[in-house]
């Protein structure tokens, strides 16, 4: 028995220590800000958006006149009649030219390529929004889990404080012979049970709180107090404005752009070119061989083994896959929102009924407490009433937090 009391004392000291440590408060917005700033996936997507911007600039630069300098020096000796034919090589060759070329009459091809990069940027930005909302949902869920553990521990501590006060009064009644010693011991055992539960809930809170820090990338071992976040239901956006649906629209535009790019491959490609410099095979006439040239070229695909037809088939398959995913997601979206709204209504109704029960049970406990203090109620009946109050309040926590969990899910789907 002495070791049990020592164990209970240590748990009580742990609870007091933790109560002292949890002296500051942090709200949900703090963790959302830290989690968003520290999340590597969001940073990765931002870097991909930046890289895509540079790809677009590179593509634009490729349509400007391209200027290159080419130099060439060749000497083919003939020794004792052995060597390359002078008719072919002229024996030696020196050239240094500045070359310019640019594709022209390709406005539609340029626009199709620029659209490809624009759609890639839109897709990445949309992915970033969805990822940010998923992160927000995960952080909010973990915050609620930590808050739930903290609130349950607080309720247990309140009941424990009440029983500690009653223990002092009951001890006096035992000394006066109004209550028996075993009644007093029953109360002490119940206090020890509450001490153990408080210790278990403290460990649970620490675990949930550290998980919250881990999700947000926060390196801090200090425990903080949490408050129930005010989560309000978002106004329902039109599906086409939601990132969850917009991704399918962007994919559709990507497929259309892909088809356009395939078509542009079979249009004539016209370029102009020019060069200027020196080309010479006789050093003594070097000064006479400075010159320029210019011209135009055209490329037109004639036959490539029906690749265009095969590309069209591939594009049709991609569009059918996209439509299938969009239709199934639309079904999931509407079904999930309907189910969550119904669940939220039921939880709120149960929460209101539970509030009434808590009020009645609390009144009963107060009356039983008065009877206990005058020696007119057994300690067993009082503990039973107190347990009913604990259970009712515990259910109240579950309903309250469950409603916030559901609202968090609803707001994710209605982003």
Image: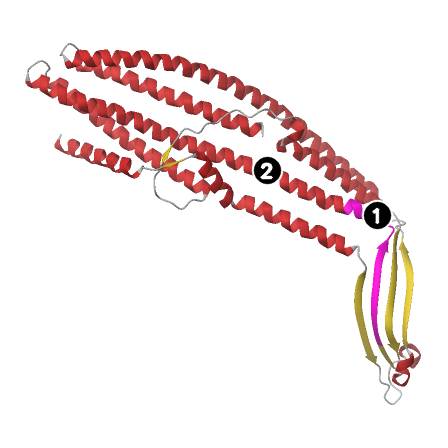
Q: Residue at 73% of width from left, 39% of height from top?
A: 254
Single out the residue that lies furthest toward the left.
176
Q: Position of residue 388 (x, y in %)?
A: 29, 16
Q: Position of residue 384 (x, y in %)?
A: 24, 15
| Disc 1 crowd, CA 10 A, few/some/many (<14, 14-19, 20+) | few
Res. 107 mark: 1
Q: Residue at 33% of width from left, 13% of height from top?
A: 359
Q: Is residue 389 visible?
A: yes
Q: Residue at 17% of width from left, 20% of height from top?
A: 166
Residue of label 2: 129
Locate residue 190 relative to residue 331 in the image: left or right.
Answer: left
Quarter residue 94 falls in: bottom right
Q: Which residues are magenta?
A: 95-113
Q: Position of residue 40 (x, y in %)?
A: 52, 46
Q: Are the residues tagged 2 and 1 within 8 Å (C-beta)?
A: no
Is residue 83 positioned above or below 222 on the image? below
Is residue 66 positioned above or below 39 on the image? below
Q: Is residue 378 visible?
A: no
Quarter residue 96 falls in: bottom right
Locate residue 363 relative to residue 267 in the image: left or right.
Answer: left
Locate residue 131 relative to residue 210 in the image: left or right.
Answer: right
**Quadrant the C terminus occupies:** top right
The kind of secondary structure element at disc 2 is: helix
């Amino acid at each position: 028995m002495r070791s049990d009391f020592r164990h209970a004392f240590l748990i009580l000291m742990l609870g007091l220590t933790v109560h002292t440590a949890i002296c500051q408060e942090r709200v949900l917005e703090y963790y959302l800000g830290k989690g968003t700033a520290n999340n590597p996936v969001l940073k990765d997507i931002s870097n991909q958006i930046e890289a895509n911007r540079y790809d677009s600039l590179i593509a634009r630069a490729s349509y400007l006149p391209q200027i290159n300098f080419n130099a060439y020096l060749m000497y083919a000796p003939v020794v004792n009649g052995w060597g390359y034919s002078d008719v072919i090589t002229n024996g030696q060759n020196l050239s240094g030219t500045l070359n310019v070329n640019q594709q022209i009459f390709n406005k539609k091809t340029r626009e199709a390529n620029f659209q490809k990069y624009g759609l890639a940027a839109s897709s990445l930005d949309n992915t970033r929004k969805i990822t940010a909302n998923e992160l927000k949902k995960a952080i909010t869920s973990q915050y609620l889990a930590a808050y739930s553990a903290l609130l349950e521990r607080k309720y247990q501590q309140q009941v424990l404080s009440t029983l500690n006060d009653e223990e002092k009064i009951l001890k006096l009644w035992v000394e006066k012979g109004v209550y028996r010693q075993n009644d007093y011991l029953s109360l002490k055992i119940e206090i020890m049970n509450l001490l153990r539960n408080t210790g278990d809930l403290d460990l649970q809170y620490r675990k949930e709180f550290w998980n919250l820090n881990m999700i947000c990338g926060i390196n801090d071992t200090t425990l903080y107090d949490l408050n129930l976040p005010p989560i309000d239901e978002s106004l329902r956006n039109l599906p086409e404005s939601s990132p969850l649906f917009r991704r399918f629209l962007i994919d559709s535009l990507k497929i259309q752009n892909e088809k356009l790019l395939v078509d542009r491959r079979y249009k004539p490609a016209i370029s102009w070119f020019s060069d200027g410099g020196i080309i010479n095979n006789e050093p003594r006439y070097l000064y006479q061989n400075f010159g320029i040239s210019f011209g135009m070229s055209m490329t037109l695909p004639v036959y490539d083994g029906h690749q265009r037809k095969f590309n069209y088939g591939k594009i049709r398959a991609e569009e059918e896959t996209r439509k299938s995913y969009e239709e199934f997601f639309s079904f999931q979206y509407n079904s999930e929102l309907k189910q969550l709204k119904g669940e939220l209504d039921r939880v709120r109704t149960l929460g209101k009924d539970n509030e009434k029960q808590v009020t009645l049970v609390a009144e009963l406990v107060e009356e039983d407490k008065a009877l206990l203090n005058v020696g007119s109620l057994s300690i067993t009946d009082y503990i039973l009433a107190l347990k009913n109050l604990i259970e009712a309040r515990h259910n109240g926590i579950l309903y309250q937090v469950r409603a916030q969990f559901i609202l968090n899910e609803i707001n994710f789907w209605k982003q």
